[in-house]
Amino acid sequence: MIRCDGDFITAGLINTHHHLFQWMTRGRCTGCDLFGWLVELYPVWGRLDVEDVRAAALVGLGELALTGCTTAADHHYLVPRGDDSVFDALAEGARTIGIRMHLARGSMDLGESRGGLPPDHVVEDVDAILASTQSVIERHHDGERIVVTVAPCSPFSVSPELMRESAALARRHGLRLHTHLAETLDEERDTLERFGRRPVELLGDLEWIAGDVWVAHGIHFDDGEVARLGAVGTGVAHCPSSNGRLGAGMCRVVDLEAAGAPVGLGVDGVASNEVGGLQPEIRQALYTARQRAGRADALMPQDVLRLATEGGARCLGRDDVGRLEPGCRGDVVVWPGDDLADVPDPLAGFALGPDRRARHVLVDGEAVVRDGELVGADMRALRRDLAERARRLWP
Ligand SMILES: [Zn+2]
């Protein structure tokens, strides 16, 4: 039995975009924009081994669970030396912590020598990517606790051929597609220079503007693009802290939802977020939407909770999570409310008030956080292991 006197309850939160491995490189390149940050960090990420990724994933997933997340998408696009057992480590991490994972087999095939941004030694070739993706699907996809997604990284690190082949592979298996899109104006300039098209036009030509796709960031859309995404139901993972840290811009969350596009929240990798908790993104998303609109009622507490739950579920193509309703899975978060007794509406306190950690978290009715501690792992030990590994990465 769980007592909840004075506490309040929500559906489990849903994280729609992450790069768990990036916890290994927190606190670096603190004044860089996206391209500068990536160019500094790609070579370091290229040195990560599977055990480094496992250590980062356990801390990252633990932090998500402790901040009320019960379903998390992870976009893993770095597979140094082609060792795709890194996806086994990520899936095992989700089982250890006890939350659902949408495991996005990311990929990059466009190295510097062919006009891409990443150095050649961190990219793979198309055939190897597709064979590995097929294998990851066979090894891990169960459609419920581990859901595999096909996820070439970004317009400036993948070839059109990889985008097309990835879409065909995903659609053969009935799986969803994910990528980064319209994160920065640098990306927009890059696709205009190389293809003569804006990022959305480019993805449309590659059959990626569709209802089985959700994209990360989705900041630099014009009105026609917002309408197009809404009409077909392409989802957007809004990552406000990461966007703020990198100075990328502010997502048109309100316009996208009004047009019909699913919008969820994402922490993004912790190297561009530094926090890694999902609950703090709720306040950040509310503030960002109000700043962008210049209106204090642009996004209300109930709206931003919807993004963090139902909106995320829609992005991930799920109708069994994100709501506290009969027929949905038993993903429930009990939040401490003792500091909010003076606030008339607990939801206002939750969205506008201080950062909050879950008291109890249930996934499918099973406790994964009890009394503010992980059930399946010791967070202090996980953090210690990660710190020792992270220090070894830097000269
Ligand atoms: Zn990202």
Image (cartoon, rainbow, N blue to C red):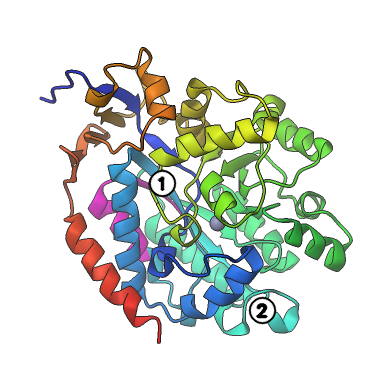
Rate crowding at label 1 as few (under 14), some (14 to 19) or many (20 or more) other CA atoms within 10 Å: many
Task: State the mark number for residue 111.
Answer: 2
Q: Nearer the viewer, residue 373 or 293?
A: 293
Residue 317 appears in the rendering: no
Q: Are marks 2 and 1 in contact (CB under 8 Å)?
A: no
Residue 350: percent from left, percent from top: 38, 27
Three-letter code, disc 2: Gly
Q: Residue at x 71, y 50 (%)?
A: 208
Question: Which badge, 2 or 1, comes first in the chain's sequence?
Answer: 1
Task: Residue lying at the far front in this picture: please name it.
Answer: 342
Q: Residue at x 66, y 79 (%)?
A: 111
Label 2 – label 1 distance at C-alpha? 29 Å
Residue 5: percent from left, percent from top: 17, 18
> Label 1, on which residue?
72
Magenta residue check for 93: yes
Number of numbered labels in the structure image = 2
Task: Residue lying at the far left in this picture: please name it.
Answer: 1
Circle 1 — which element? strand
Does the Cβ of the disc 2 residue fall within 8 Å of ligand 1?
Answer: no
Task: Residue lying at the far bottom in this picture: please name it.
Answer: 395
**Secondary structure predominantly adopted by residues drawn in magenta:** helix
The stretch of residues the image draws in magenta is: 88-103
Residue 316: percent from left, percent from top: 51, 40
Residue 145: percent from left, percent from top: 35, 45
Q: Nearer the viewer, residue 117 or 51?
A: 117
Q: Residue at x 42, y 44 (%)?
A: 143
